[in-house]
Image (spheres, grey):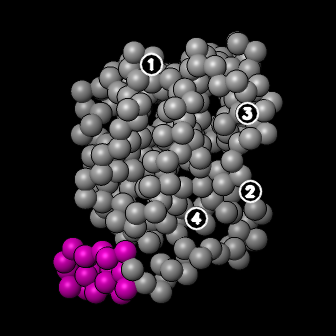
Amino acid sequence: MSVVLDVDGHVARVTIDRPARMNAIDAVTHRRLADIWDEIEADSEIRCAVLTGAGDRAFSAGADLKDDTGLSGEEYWKGLSADGYRGISLRQMSTPVIARVNGLALGGGLEMVLGCDIVIAADTARFALPEAKVGRVPLDGGMVMLPRLIPRNIAMGMMMTGRMVPAAEMAGYGLVNAVVPFAELDAEVDRWVADLLASAPLSLRAIKAVARRTAALPLHQAYETGAPELSDALRSEDAHEGVAAFRARRAPVWRGR
């Protein structure tokens, strides 16, 4: 199995398990990831997901160049799914996703990171989009997302040169939430997971949906733009539970409805 899915309570942990290939993505892995994202989205009990790679060398080295899919780059680009989260792209996931970056995040590996909501990296992690070095381009969101998430010239420099950027530097650009020694990576991820689980699940989905929908809108229009997830959160039982728990000075019991 090239990808391992482990669901424990309200948390789904997704591990790309090809350490001998630096967790590179071949066609089989791409399809398995797509199926896993569908499974997670369909399970209302899952409140957050953690994505990582096996071992301590790589989160993912991106596309496996030894894997011959039979598709040209143009055919792959034209066949990218319109729903936005098939395969390695997580941009339309409603479930909050944490990237546990345990090593190199290259090409499609970095593009997966760009689709996550929270990024926790080991201090040994490095990030790059080296596609131009092999006559390719970052098709799975790199060209669009990276210049929106970090300064434009930094993004262009990364894409045009393929240079690797250390985790601490990426944190300085705002892409990474926390950088810790590798030995502390799991503990730091678990702290973020606990914080997410302490928040109302419908509130998290609403925040993610509205932030995504309004990202490119003018400010006045963004304020007026809602989402079905926002209405669900405002009308939910959890909205009443949160206030009741605050007044009673107790921890809320979220039901996701």
User: Left or right: 19 with respect to 229?
Assistant: left
> Which residue matches tag 3?
76
| Quarter the C terminus occupies | bottom left
Which circle's residue, 3 or 1, is located before the other in the chain? Answer: 1
* Kind of element beneath mark 4: helix
Q: Is residue 150 left or right of residue 49?
A: right
Give the amino acid type for the residue marked by disc 3 in the picture: Tyr
Residue nearest the viewer, comparing 180 with 100? 100
Specify the segment rendered in magenta. 237-256
User: Which residue lies at the image location 76% right of the left edge and 25% below the top edge?
Assistant: 72
Q: Badges 3 and 4: C-beta atoms under 8 Å apart?
A: no
Sequence-wise, which precedes: disc 3 or disc 4?
A: 3
Q: Earlier in the sequence, mark 4 or mark 1?
A: 1
Identify which residue is drawn at 75% across, 71% down: 220
Expressed as whole percent of the image width and height from the top left, the position of residue 37 reads 49, 50
Q: Identify the amino acid type marked 2.
A: Ala
Mark positioned earlier in the residue sequence (2 or 1): 1
